[in-house]
Image: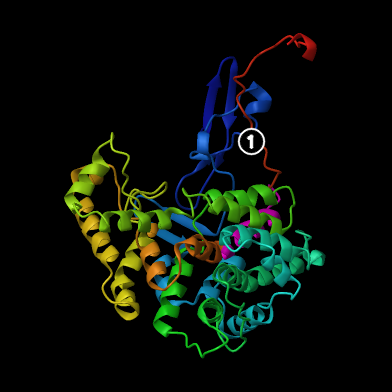
Amino acid sequence: MDDGGATLNLGDHTLDLSAVPARMGNHGVDIGSLRAQTRTVTYDPGFANTASAQSTITYIDGTAGKLTHRGYAIEDLANSCGFLEVAFLLLFGHLPNKAELEEWQASMNRHSLLNEELKRFFDAFPKQAHPMAILSSATNAISTFYEEYHNPKDEASVIESAQRLIAKMPTVAAWAYKKSTGFPYIYPRNDLRYVANFLHMMFALPTEEYHVDPVIAKALNVLLILHADHGQNCSTATVRFVGSSQANLFASVAAGMNALWGPLHGGANQAVVEMLAEIANDPSASTESYIARAKDKNDPFRLMGFGHRVYNNYDPRARILKKFADDVLDRVEGDDPLLRIAEELEEAALSDEYFQERNLYPNVDFYSGIIFRALGFPMRMFTVLFAIGRLPGWIANWKEMTEDPATRIARPRQIYVGEESRRFIPLHQR
């Protein structure tokens, strides 16, 4: 077709499929009429070739290793912005001016406190409960205190819900951690900024003064920004999927958290640290031996943190983390054998034809787990930190979806391959 669409010949049917142009990246073809006209559906496991939305939030060029939010390069945002600035950008489409940012930060402080009744909620979990289970459960529980804000068509209610979610999530995460340690919950402080407040609630004790190290706060700020959004990934698509039924923002975000919890998504950085620890504890280990194992298809060992579903180039987020990993580790604990092993593995892999031919470059998980660990976070908190960072992206995508008149309730089709017809046999004859 002249408009960039396509003509599909399928049996006795000829369909003109109109184009869905992109400003950058992959163009689309509208197949909305395919099933109605031909009783045929497309088959795309994992939806790797299916666009579920038109979005203005995030653009990824996997070949060039490029990531932008609302047109701004991730490098500029990570180096020059605070996390709440990026959250504002994702939600409202522009970077805030000074007055807007001050009001936005003030709203985070106003809403950071949890209702006292939620203390009993945290107390009800066993001490060993995974913090991601608490995080998603608490997100649903918080919604019960704000049912007047559940209407997805009310813009003011959506903004109120978004503010409460972003403001309260560090408190929820810190209390989930305190629950696992048996130490008292620490309340948020309105005199601290977002990241510093979170660190204070995580690591302070009522018995002594706690000072937030600005180097650690800066590192965590960058880490949260690097996780803020990444297009239609598994958890973001889940948020949109659930929200398409007009489920409220709290319920939709809670669903996204559960999707993120999976080891193939939010748990990947923990897998990297576990792999590096395995190598460090192996007395016969060498970089060459583990690279060889990674290339052996009969060996179950996998080099975690390399390759990405979207990027076939160096993940730009990994480049940013690599630049300041040494500085952070020098500040908080000096030499880290896991970082040394990671750097050796990266150097060996990037010079190896096997990895070059398959475009297996380090991704954001390769360094984020090491830095989270150096900042003092236990591994069970890694995915929680990912969730706090990704929260603005989830909300922005949910908001974009609810405002899009083309949105329909998500309802993928299937290709049935089961039994055609079976004679029913009563129970006494089976």
Dot 1, crowdedness within 10 Å: few (<14), some or many (≥20)? few
Residue ranking furthest to the right: 148
Q: From the viewer's side, name the closer residue of 397 and 173.
A: 173
In this rendering, does residue 160 appear at all?
A: no
State whether residue 337 appears in this view: yes
Q: Position of residue 1 (x, y in %)?
A: 51, 32
Query: How many numbered circles does the render carry?
Result: 1
Query: Residue at (59%, 48%) from the top-left corner?
Result: 53
Q: Amino acid under label 1?
A: Pro
Residue at 37% x, 71% y is 374
Q: Assign the magenta stretch its main secondary structure.
A: helix
- In the depicted view, which residue is nearer to us: 301 or 109? 301
> 217 above or below 161?
below
Magenta segment: does it hold 393? yes
In the rendered structure, the answer to whether residue 341 lies left or right of residue 209 reads: left
Please give the range of residues in magenta. Answer: 391-406
Q: Is residue 51 left or right of residue 312?
A: right
Residue 327 within the segment the image draws in magenta: no
Q: Residue 347's spot in the image, x, y percent?
A: 20, 57
Q: Which residue is mark 1?
A: 412
Place residue 411 in its image quadrant.
Answer: top right
